[in-house]
Every structure is written in structure tokens, then in C-alpha cells.
Image (cartoon, grey):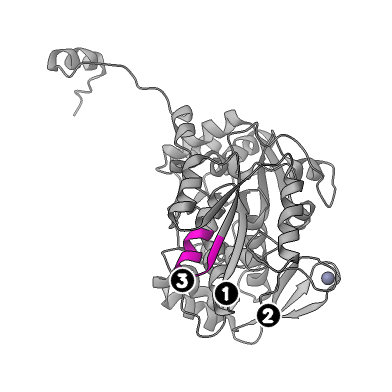
Amino acid sequence: MNLASHYVCDDCHARTPADVPALLCDACGGLLEMAYDLTRVPARDILARAAEHREIGVWRWADLLPVPEGTEPLYLGEGDTPLLTTRRLGETLNIPNLMIKNDTLMPTGSFKDRGFAIAVGYARALGVKQAFTYSSGNAGASFATYAARAGIDATVLVEDSAHESKIAAIGLYGARVLRLQYRSSLEIFASVSALTRAGLYSFVNFINPIRHEGMKTYAYEICEALGWKAPDVMVHPVGTGGGLWGAWKGFRELRQMGVIDRLPRMIGVQPSASAPIVRAFNEGLPSAAPHGDATRTVAQSIAGDAPIQGGTRVLSAIYASGGRAVAVDDGDLFEAMRLLGAEGVTAEPSAAASVAALLRARSQGWVSENDTVVAVITGSGQKQPDVLVRAAPPPAGDVRADPDELLKWFGDRMDNGR
Ligand SMILES: [Zn+2]
């Protein structure tokens, strides 16, 4: 099992062996986290091995992931997405060292593939045959894809507000879809916890202790691209917070290994219509109470009124890193989508939240112009085509396909200064 040694419970600290497909703590029901023996192999050997195997994306970091020995990578092209230097965007925000981690280019168009590739690979290696998750869309598509590749019977509980194209993708990738009616996310968590306790293997964020392990690969890829340095700031949209928390764990492990010498400030972003984590952060609380109305924002992928387990993990990462939680309005999201479009990145509104948060950072002074900032763009705008239409400027005009009319239209707009 490489360097993975055992699971530890967040609450009672009981240990569970790493090679059983555990979900919640047997003793108290708490969340489990995988622990590693990071000193067993010199860090330079791990990094060298990873550098030699770029053809397998996130799987090249198998030493630092719970990948059982002999596991065949479920590789579909996940990982090693571009870390783009921005052009106009950095200037507009007055953050010259702003970079975009473009995870819209993942196999299913979202960052979820980092986690599901590893988590489904782990489950298959340990003999899991049937499993479920719940999703607002992106996670379901990712789970369906990797489960199909792994031959695992997959059911996805989908929020009934999910875009029909996201629901269709889940079915296309071969999973069974159950559309969920609910009043609050609390009802969803009570239901998925009951299924888990009844013995069904769950891929729900945090209940499943492997998905966020795959998200650690953010930290590895970003630090490698920066010459084994962490950025000053990492900005990540937050629904349940698996991406932010996983990346934070990856950064911490790199520091423990002596590969980097300091950690980034983690900034989590939520839509102001439902921002339980932001409200808890503003009040300095360790966990978040239900808040807001998740149907009143276009940021569907991160709209949840009640984070799982009160969002304790994501809040602890934000506090420990000296970061912050930020709420953004739909208007900010549309502007951020246009700014990203001009950089060649098609972001869904939830993904554009990273840049929307930085629009506020400029005016409020919590990012300096000397900071190296990585904004993660988590999902493709092609999944919410109706919102792309709302964000984009309308056509400049209607004109007949007639040379004279077109020449007239261009008229003064013609640039003859070749
Ligand atoms: Zn426990």
C-alpha cells in the first residue's frame, strides 16, 4: 500500500487499517482520514519517480496516495492540467502573478476526476462491486465514468435542481440516476448516512475517505510547476469543500516531507445566496449551521445550504492557513466568466467563483500585488450552456450576407493600418 499506513478518526482518533474499504469510524461514526508514513522513502525518490511518469497523470503520485500495490491505473487523462499565466486578467485584478489552474480540461470536464479516479481505483482494488454517491451533477458524471471503467455497479442520487445536461451525462456514462427531492441538504446527508450505515459503499465527499486524497494532486502539480514552492494564495470554490481540503492536505504533506517550506493561504468561495461556510468564518465558528437558499444562484455546483459535518474540515483548513471564506453574487460570477473567457477558459459559474472572489480581494486588500496566486477553475461552462448565454455579451448586430451591407457595417471599424 505504498506509504499509506492507516485511517484515523477525526473525533475519537481510533485507527482502521488502510487496506479495508472503510467509510465512517466503527467506534463513533466520525470522518476518517488516511495517514501516511512519509519518512519511509526519501522525498527526492518520490518526486523523481513522479517526474518520470507524466503519461499517467494523477497516478504518477501513487506513492503519496492510497493506491494498493499492483493497481492498474484507471487512467482517462486526469491530472496535469495547465497552470496558465494570465494576460489581461492579472492586469485587471492588479495581481501580476495570478495563475489559472484549468481543471475544466479533465476527462468529464471537472476537477472531480482527480478524486474519483483514485477513489474508484482504490475501491476496485479492494473488491467493492456496488456503490453510490449523491451529486449536483459534476461528481455524478465523474463517478459514473470511473465506475463504468472499473466495472462497479453505480447509482447516483442527483439533486433535482441539477442541469438536465449534467443528468444526461451521468446516464450516458452508464450509472443509474435517481432524482432527489428535498427541502434542505440536511435531509440528503441524513439519507446518505443511513445508506452508508446499512453497508452500501459510499462515494459521498468526506464520508468516502479517499476522494479528497486524489485532490492532493493539485498541491503536487502546482508546487512542481512553481519549482517546488507553494503559491502564496490558492483560491477554490467550496460546496462540501473536498477540493480545498484535499489540496490543503497535499500542501501540508509536502511541507512535512521537506519539499516546500511554507503553506499557502486557502481562500474558499461560496455564492452569497447560500454561504454557510462564509457565515461561520465571519463569526469565527468551527462549524457551519444551515444557511441560505441554494436555488437562488446560478452557481449550482457549489450551492448547498448545509455542508456535510458542518464543514468543520474546510473551516479548519481556512483558519489554519490564515486564509478566508468569501461570498460572491451572481453578477460577480457573470463578470468572472467573461474575464476567464478572454483568457481562453470556459468556466461554469461555480468555477468562475475563484476569479469572482479575487475581484473583491483587489478592493479589500487581502491579496497583495506581490502575491503569487493560483485560482482553480473547477468545471467547464459547457455543462451549463443556458448560463453561458446569459454571461456572454449579445451579438453585435444582425446583417444580411451581402458584400455591400457588410462593407457598410464594418465602415469606420475597418483597421487599415496594416
Ligand atoms: Zn471515531
Q: Which residues are magenta?
A: 143-154
Quadrant of the rendered image holding ligand 1: bottom right
Q: Which mark is residue 18?
A: 2
What secondary structure is found at the residue carrying circle 3? Answer: loop
* CA distance for labels 3 and 2: 20 Å
Which amino acid type is shown beneath numbered disc 2?
Answer: Ala
Residue ranking furthest to the left: 403
Residue 318 part of the magenta segment: no
Q: Which residue is mark 1?
A: 122
Q: Position of residue 352 (x, y in %)?
A: 54, 41
What secondary structure is found at the residue carrying circle 2? Answer: loop
* CA distance for labels 3 and 1: 10 Å
374 on left or right of 194 = left
The number of callouts visible is 3
Residue at x-position 57% and y-position 63%: 115
* Structural crowding at the residue carrying mark 1, measured as other residues with C-alpha within 10 Å and reported as few (<14), some (14–19) or many (≥20): many
